[in-house]
Image: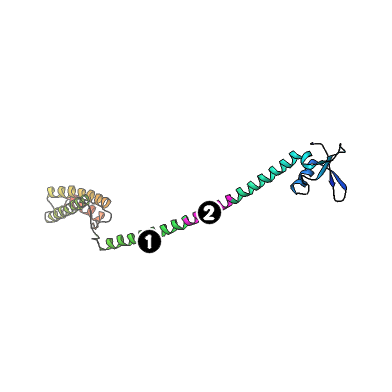
Amino acid sequence: MADAMIFVMDELAGQEHGPYSLAEIQTQIYQKKLKKKHLVRKSDYSQWFKAEDLLGKVFTAVEQTKTNEKQQAKDDKAKKKQQAKDDKEQRKQQAKDEKDQEKQQVQNDEETAVEAEELADSDPYTISEADKAMLSLYLETMRTYGDRLQALKDEPDNAELKQAVIQCGTRFAKITHQARAALPSEPIKTFDEDVLQADLKKAMTPQD
């Protein structure tokens, strides 16, 4: 059948048409130009047969093709419908997410504003216990150094006072450095290193 050529009888005109290849016959069946009741014959036969008798398998194959195409069209339609539904749900969820994000942003802004207000109303100068201890040590050492320096001015020839000023001044410089490092935002009185060195030099220089 694969190599056979087919003639088709035009019963109204009483004429035969062809020969047609199997592919051409399949096209005619698909387009409903050739029906099962029509008469056909193979090119190597002179006897005519109904198309359904000679080409039964061909009709079945074409019908199956149409069935498959119909099912495919149905599946495509269902898929397209589902896709539209999914897209709608996605847009709906996206809109909900954006609304939730906006709501959360408003809430965050309100919380930030409250925190800023509370900070503005709070004591601007609060330090931890450890920082308080460092600040107290700094202030105490500064007073001690000042007292001993004044005593040295009153008794410039007192060797013991000179040594005390040197030791206290050195310690004061060290504690000041530590306090500045530990409490960069605290109101520590500015300490002039040049003044300290001048004081120490004076304490170590014999008086004429």
Kind of residue indicated by mark 2:
Lys
Q: Quadrant of residue 107?
A: bottom left
Left or right of 164, for residue 65 = right
- Circle nearer the N terminus (2, 1): 2
Q: Which residues are magenta?
A: 78-92
Provide the residue designation for mark 1.
106
Kind of residue indicated by mark 1:
Val
Q: Quadrant of residue 120?
A: bottom left
Expressed as whole percent of the image width and height from the top left, the position of residue 121 reads 25, 63
Left or right of 15, for residue 92 = left
Expressed as whole percent of the image width and height from the top left, the position of residue 15 reads 88, 48
Expressed as whole percent of the image width and height from the top left, the position of residue 81 reads 56, 53
* Overall secondary structure of the magenta section: helix
Q: Which quadrant: the N terminus? A: top right
123 drawn magenta = no
Expressed as whole percent of the image width and height from the top left, the position of residue 69 reads 66, 46
Provide the residue designation for mark 2.
85
The residue closer to the viewer here, 81 or 203, is 81
Name the secondary structure under disc 1: helix
The residue closer to the viewer here, 80 or 61, is 61
Using the numbered discs, state the Cα–Cα distance from disc 2 to disc 1 in whole angstroms.
32 Å
* Residue 174 image label: none
